[in-house]
Image: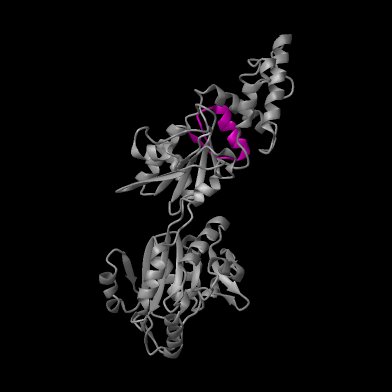
Amino acid sequence: MIDIPSPAVAVVGRHNSGKTTLIERLIAELTGRGLDVGSIKHHSHRGFDIDIPGKDSYRHRAAGASETVIAAPGQVARIKTVEDEVECSELVRSMPNHDIIVVEGYRKSGLPTIEIMRLGNEADCRAARLFVKAAREGLPLTTDFTQLGRAVDRAGNAAGRDGAGEVPGLGEMPGAGEVSGASDYSAAADAAAKMPSTNTVAVVTDIPDAEEAAALYGIPAIGLEDVAALADFLSEHYVRPRVTVVIQAGGESRRMGQSKATVPFAGRPLICRLVERLSPVADELIITTNEADRLGFLHDMYPDLTIRLVGDAYAERGALPGLYTALAAAENPYVAVVACDMVFASARLVVAEALSMHESGADVVAPSNKHGFEPLHAMYRKEGCLDAVHARTERGEKRVQSFFDDPAVTVLPFNQDRVLEVEPRGGCFINANTPEELARIEQSYLGE
């Protein structure tokens, strides 16, 4: 089983801002689009219990079990006693293989955060006014809003005592003057402690001040009721991009003396090994070939996999025309291309390349070493590469690297150290071009 790390975003706000209601609607919208969604709820108080008193599992815990697993067909739950609060990052790591995880709370986790501010919540209105004051004065999101809020509150109290209608400096803030000195301006301080930050990627609100502040800071503002727009935003920027894995099988190999796809390896056609190694991380699996009729047996061997056999788009042989076929056929934005003779092709490397592409925004993530790139175990962004590959193919180019110098294409080398972090034993790029090479690889493989 290859675990794919799940991307995560946190929905944050003040008490009664409507976080749970928004998340409930957001999860329904995302799952309605066919996405696999995980969720995490931050509970700030010790001693909560999700088990039911009197049930057998509750009795296990009451008797002293430090960890109890409740398992039933279709469901499993784990309740565990821990010494300290578990970091959000650790929880996210423990939940792989989701398209996205929506976290409620954990403002300080370092995750991208979506700030909710609701007009019907007094604390949100107070925070929105402070937010817009800071934005109008050009203060950075690294500003200590707690100190700023207290300053505004003190000014508001002074103005109220003096009968003045304006607060010097930053001006009035809803709630200013309502907090007594004895409370040390706690209401304003509480609101100010829960403010947008450099981790804020969107503001969901129906408060005009919050909308204005978001615009001044260059942060998207989404309507409180526009859950579809929020889902669109997450789908574009944070949902795990779907990956098409393309195994380039081609056809008859002169040096091998037969098709590499059907040459025997460990008692089965070599293509079967590639399918089994790479399909666990493929949202779509394509095999490009000019002998689809000879590979039809794959549909019978793997009835649970929807394998597409795609004919070459160009009659000319070559790696670049083959890449064009792969990109043109893929239905997903990320396209992993692997040659069918790479006996130790790595699903983990495919995952790592996809994550690197998502984080960097690159159009190509290709393993590299002192000899150059490994373009036939690399990741390609369809939108960024298709036109460039087509143009170079039309010019008669055959090598994949021929389009890497296109000024419109960003290429990110995935160096050897990073490859070894993913696959410590290496060997991902070993390929066989002759029967003798394949026999040596097979002997080594069977001897392990």
- Side of 95 relative to 86 (left or right): left
The colouring scheme, among rainbow, by chain, secondary structure or one colour, is: one colour
In percent of width and height, residue 109 lies at 58, 43
Give the image quarter of residue 302. bottom left
Residue placed farthest to the left in the image?
A: 300
- In the rendered image, the vertical position of residue 380 relative to residue 158, given as above or below: below
- Side of 156 relative to 39 (left or right): right
Give the image quarter of residue 312. bottom left
Q: Which residue is drawn at 55% across and 26% down?
A: 124
- In the rendered image, the vertical position of residue 289 relative to residue 328, given as above or below: below
In percent of width and height, residue 217 lies at 62, 38
- In the rendered image, the vertical position of residue 7 relative to residue 373, given as above or below: above
- Report if residue 314 is visible in the image: no
Quadrant that contains the N terminus: bottom left
Magenta stretch holds residue 208:
yes
Q: Nearer the viewer, residue 447 or 321?
A: 447
Q: Which of 114 and 105 is in front in this view?
A: 105
Magenta stretch holds residue 245:
no
Q: Residue at x 28, y 79 (%)?
A: 294
- Report if residue 184 is visible in the image: yes
Quadrant that contains the C terminus: bottom left
Q: Which of 236 and 85 is in front in this view?
A: 85
Q: How many marks?
A: 0
Residue placed farthest to the front in the image?
A: 63
In percent of width and height, residue 32 lies at 35, 44
Q: What stretch is highlighted in magenta?
A: 202-223
